[in-house]
Amino acid sequence: MATKTIVQYRNRPKAKRHAKAGMTVSLAMIGGLTPMLADLMSAYKVGGGEAVLGHVSLCTTGYDPADGKWKPMFAVQKLYGPMFIATVVHKFAGKLGINRMIAKAGIPIFRL
C-alpha cells in the first residue's frame, strides 16, 4: 500500500505597497514668487485693488496699463528672473538628494 503525500499549503507573502506621494510645496518656488508678491502688496497699499490689477499685468507680461507701454525688464526683475533662479535651485536640490533627505526626516509638506 502506497503512502499518501501530505501537502501543506502556505500563504504567499503579501506584496509590499508603495504609498502615493502626498502634496508637497517647494520653498524655492515660493521664494521665486516673493518679489512679485511684495510688489503687489506695496501697490495695494498705495492704490488699492485697481493698482493691484495693473501691477499683476505689469509683473507677468510687462505691459503697463497705466501708461500703455511695454516694460519687459520689469517682468524679468519681478517674476521671470527669480522664478528661473528658483527652478535651478529646486532642480539642483533634487539632484543632490536634499529633498529625499527632507522626506526621510519626516518633514511632511515642504521641500526645497
Image: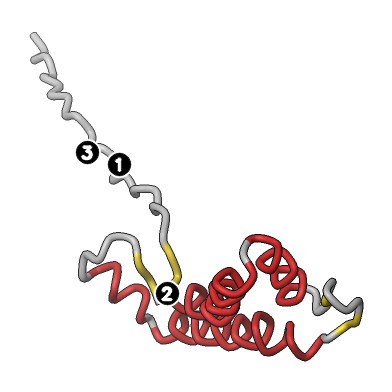
Task: Name the quarter where the N terminus is drawn.
Answer: top left
Q: Amino acid at mark 2?
A: Leu
**Crowdedness near tag 1: few (<14), some (14–19) or many (≥20) residues, C-alpha within 10 Å:** few
Separation of marks 1 and 2 at Cα, in angstroms: 35 Å
Q: Are marks 1 and 3 in contact (CB under 8 Å)?
A: yes
User: Picture coordinates of residue 30 (x, y %)?
Assistant: 48, 73
* Residue pictured at 54% horizontal, 72% vertical: 45
Identify which residue is drawn at 90% across, 81% down.
69
Q: CA distance from mark 3 to mark 2?
A: 40 Å
Quarter of the image for residue 102 reads bottom left
Q: CA distance from mark 1 to mark 3?
A: 6 Å
Mark nearest the camera among 1 and 2 is 2
Q: Helix, strand or loop at disc 3?
A: loop
Residue 13 has which mark?
A: 3
Asked which quadrant contains residue 5, the reply is: top left
3 relative position to 76: left or right: left
Going from N to C along the chain, the mark reached first, 3 or 2, is 3
Residue that protrudes farthest toward the top in the picture: 1
Residue 72 quadrant: bottom right
What's the amino acid at mark 1? Ala
